[in-house]
Amino acid sequence: MLTSKVKGKDTRPELVVRRTLHGLGGRYRLHRQDLPGSPDIVMPSRKLDLFVHGCFWHRHENCKMASTPRTREDFWQTKFEANMARDRRNETSLKQLGWRVEVIWECETKQATRLFDRLKTLLASGDGQSESRE
């Protein structure tokens, strides 16, 4: 059986976010398939969904990790556009269901202090709507 080398769950950035959240006292569920887009981290008591996006696959704007391969450019452009469209649809659907949606980018997980501060702020803001795209 062949399996993809690109993991969809339990990625290194996702594990960093989960460890940091747990250290802050945050409790969560993982990959709720009954929600649009199956968010990586779901905090039902806070009505908060977190997506941990890879900068390359989800095209983090102005990020050096969001490079575009030089071969098969049409294929990659189509792939990236489909990923971004799916992300927008999922975010819109979740918001319509009353959830707060946040995106944690892969590059953000490499800066422990900033990630800690951002997650601490998210946990403290139970009713404020934060910006999900940076």
Image: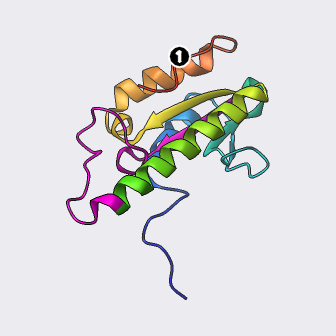
Residue 74 drawn above or below residue 65: below
Residue 103 position, x and y percent, is 51, 33
Q: Which residue is mark 1?
A: 121
Q: Residue furthest left?
A: 70
Q: How is the image coloured?
A: rainbow
Q: Is residue 41 visible?
A: yes
* Res 99 visible: no
**Residue plotted at (63% across, 39% down):** 89
Up-down relation of residue 17 to residue 117 (above or below): below
Which region of the structure is painted magenta?
48-74
Q: Residue furthest front?
A: 74
Callout 1: SS: helix
Point out residue 71 in the picture as x, y percentages from the top left corner. 22, 65
* Residue 116, picture quadrant: top left
Please say if 78 is above or below 46: below
Which of the 4 image quadrants contains residue 27?
Answer: top right
- The C terminus - image quarter: top left
Q: Is residue 24 left or right of residue 90?
A: left
The N terminus appears in which quarter of the rendering? bottom right
Q: Position of residue 33 (x, y in %)?
A: 74, 52
Q: Nearer the viewer, residue 69 or 28?
A: 69
